[in-house]
Amino acid sequence: MGLNKSFVGNVESLLQPQKYGTRHIPLLAKAFNYKTVDKLFKFPTPQYDKIRITLRITPKTNKDGSTTKGKNVELVITSESGNM
């Protein structure tokens, strides 16, 4: 897509504020070899109407139980029928 690697890494991180914007849509379409951007939006209707996304951020711990630099990040997606 011609974007800086650090920007892409930040976009993919749940802890960073950087995200793709509307100006990136044509670049994404080109990266997937789509001739038009509308192909990016052709996907099936979600199976569940309601989902809850929970981001759990906890300190990293060593084997001895002490904390270390960094964070553990867990993304939990649940529907009305339970975990997905």
Image (cartoon, grey):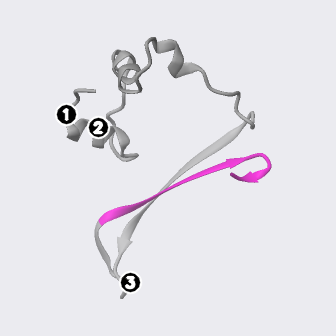
Q: Which residues are magenta?
A: 70-84
Q: CA distance from mark 2 to mark 1?
A: 7 Å
Q: Please say if the residues under marks 2 and 1 sit with CB atoms less than 8 Å apart.
A: yes
Q: Which residue is mark 2?
A: 8
Q: Earlier in the sequence, mark 1 or mark 3?
A: 1
Q: Which residue is mark 1?
A: 4
Residue type at the position of mark 1? Asn
Other-residue count near label 1 (Cα within 10 Å), few / some / many at <14 / 14–19 / ≥20: few
Identify the residue at image location x=36%, y=26%: 31
Give the percent coordinates (x, y) of residue 1: 28, 27
Name the one closer to the observer, 21 or 40.
40
Other-residue count near label 3 (Cα within 10 Å), few / some / many at <14 / 14–19 / ≥20: few
Taking the magenta stretch, the answer to whether it contains residue 8 is no
Residue type at the position of mark 2? Val
Q: Which residue is mark 3?
A: 65
Identify the residue at image location x=52%, y=13%: 38
Give the percent coordinates (x, y) of residue 29: 41, 20
Q: CA distance from mark 3 to mark 2?
A: 33 Å
- State the predominant SS element of the stretch in magenta: strand
Residue type at the position of mark 3? Gly
Within the image, what quadrant is residue 25 found in? top left
